[in-house]
Image (tube, rainbow, N blue to C red):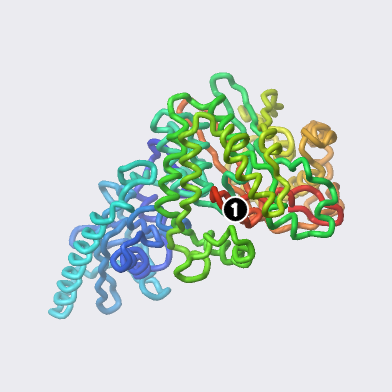
Amino acid sequence: MSHMEWGFEIDLTQQDLLIRYGFKSVIDAFYRSIWPVITSRRPPPLQAYIGLSVLPHMKKALVTSEPSSNAYLGQFASCFALGFVTANTKTRVFVTTISTQPFPDRPRDVSGTSVEVGSSKTASLERNTQEEETGFRQFITTLSAAVLVMLVLITLVFFFTAPAYSASIAGEVPFEWGPPSNSVEGKFRKAAVTTDHATCSEIGGKILKKGGNAVDASIAVMFCLGVTNPQSSGLGGGFLMTIYNKTEGKCVAIDARETAPAAAHRDMFRNDSDGSKYGFKSAGTPGELAGYWYAFTHHGSGRVAWKELIEPSVKLCRRGVPVSEYLDNVMKVKERHFRLFPSMKAWINPATNSTYRAGDLLPRLKLAQTLEKLANSNDPVKLFYRGEMADTIAKEMADGGGIITKADLASYKPRVYKQLANTHFRGNLVMCGGPPPSSFAVTQLIVSVMSALYPENHGADILSDPKVTHHFIEAMKFAYAQRTLLGDVAFVKSAETLAKNLTTEEYTKWVVQRIRDTAQPSVYYGGIAQSQVPDHGTSQVSALDELGNGVSSTTTINRWFGAAVESEAYGIVWNDEMDDFSTPGMANG
């Protein structure tokens, strides 16, 4: 499983630590994990997990490490120092580690394993015990050890004099990262959280440890993702959430997606294709906060305060967001829009006059103040949608050419669906989810078709069968062809009927009969031919608590950085969901 997951009492094996992780070279681990700490007093742009297997007399050793795609995870590197000595064709590696990933007490013997060192060539990490060390090698070894000790001491000085990074964003104690799971199926004993960002997974885990339930953890995580993944989600967007209550054996769906402002109309972007994608006019009425509050007050545990769900994200905003490689790349793509709209000037690093790069700390001070205000409010929905914040938001929208008014904000309410259709499959598999605009009906159809094609119980080996993969792709083609016809059941009368038709046994049989062992032309799958637009992604959160409750949430601001504008007063990046509505003659996003 991904290191972005967090779980209680996850089984850990030596193989998981010693074999699972690997990136490019031991040299890179040193220069990218240790050197930045020493030279710049900031966390490294790489989180290296370094395991060490040592037999008596240093006969064999294995060093492995893994880069984190989400930068430094708010803490110092796992290892403080690494030194190595080469001799002839053999490489001897000595590692000192202080790791946030607990290592096994008895390292596993991994004889015969090789690792990349220096160049891309592999070098066996064996020492010939029969070979006498020359005076030169002894000198080099001693020198290396001395340098190693110095590096450790220097790093320790920086470590203990940099409280800003040794404190956890989720509290005032250092992070205690749990070990990654070695469970392919994602099996945990008590509870688990999986998100798009390791820091947010940790925050969700801490909420569960405090006694919160899966709903509490999901809300805290989504607040966090709005900070760490601003290109995909945040208070300026909306989300869909499906909650499974184990005690009642029932599901509830919350639709907190954005809605079109009252002034919106069918032809408003007919001659303005960019207007639906960028700028204040492209923003729909955000539902994120209203959905959070409803989920918290109606389905939260009652054991964790509202403020506790937001405080970790406030601290993260003030401390600065470590920019990931992915966020770095997205900001480079969006830099043109950041310069086009004055409200996005905070996304340009004043020190370099360009967007922030991977490893930089990206401050979000305005958002920190906004989150703190919401955290301390007894009625954050009233404050945001009907109070002083609503006044400011409506004014900024009007000044920027947007159409969201205070009346639009005041009238917003998330939709809640309690009578959900449950689909039962072979064994104990039961699926539940919300109506459109959720694509749950599409998922139901795909699973139904595959269950019909393969009615017998099969092991994991079936997944490697190319024919099974082909059938799965064909099932998705039929399902997604109908997805283009779905709309919001609150506004599109035919959407609910279409969704129900997709989940009938008759329709499943019709699709099964039409699946062939070769791909077919697009028109074969039905639906309306649509041009494909780039998928900018969303943020997905899944949480299970020890009571057996489960939550699945998808939160979004639509395209990367939404409308590419943010609130000058509150630091909220607004969505561009108006691009999701169909405009005559245009492909919607």
Which type of secondary structure does the marked residue at label 1 adopt?
Answer: loop
Q: What amino acid is labelled 1 in the image?
A: Glu
Left or right? Give the position of 478 relative to 190: right
Along the viewing direction, whichever of 331 and 208 lies nearer the viewer: 331
Residue 520, can we see it?
A: no
Residue beneath the point at 19% across and 70% down: 147
Count of labels shown? 1
Report which quarter residue 450 is drawn in: top right
Q: Residue furthest top?
A: 248
Report which quarter residue 21 is drawn in: bottom left
Left or right? Give the position of 354 relative to 168: right
Residue beneath the point at 43% across and 25% down: 303
Report which quarter residue 422 is drawn in: top right
**Image position, residue 182 (x, y; %):** 43, 45
**Image position, residue 340 (x, y; %):** 64, 65
Along the viewing direction, whichever of 337 and 298 lies nearer the viewer: 337
Residue beneath the point at 31% across and 63% down: 41
**Image position, residue 76 (x, y; %):** 33, 56
**Image position, residue 526 (x, y; %):** 85, 47
Along the viewing direction, whichever of 80 and 347 lies nearer the viewer: 347
Residue 200 vs 217, above or below: the answer is: below
The residue labelled by disc 1 is 566
Residue 337 vs 86, above or below: the answer is: above
Q: Residue furthest left?
A: 135
Left or right? Give the position of 175 relative to 418: left
Left or right? Give the position of 319 relative to 440: left
Residue 469 vs 38, above or below: the answer is: above
Callout 1 environment at 10 Å: few (<14), some (14 to 19), or many (20+)? many
Residue 514, can we see it?
A: yes
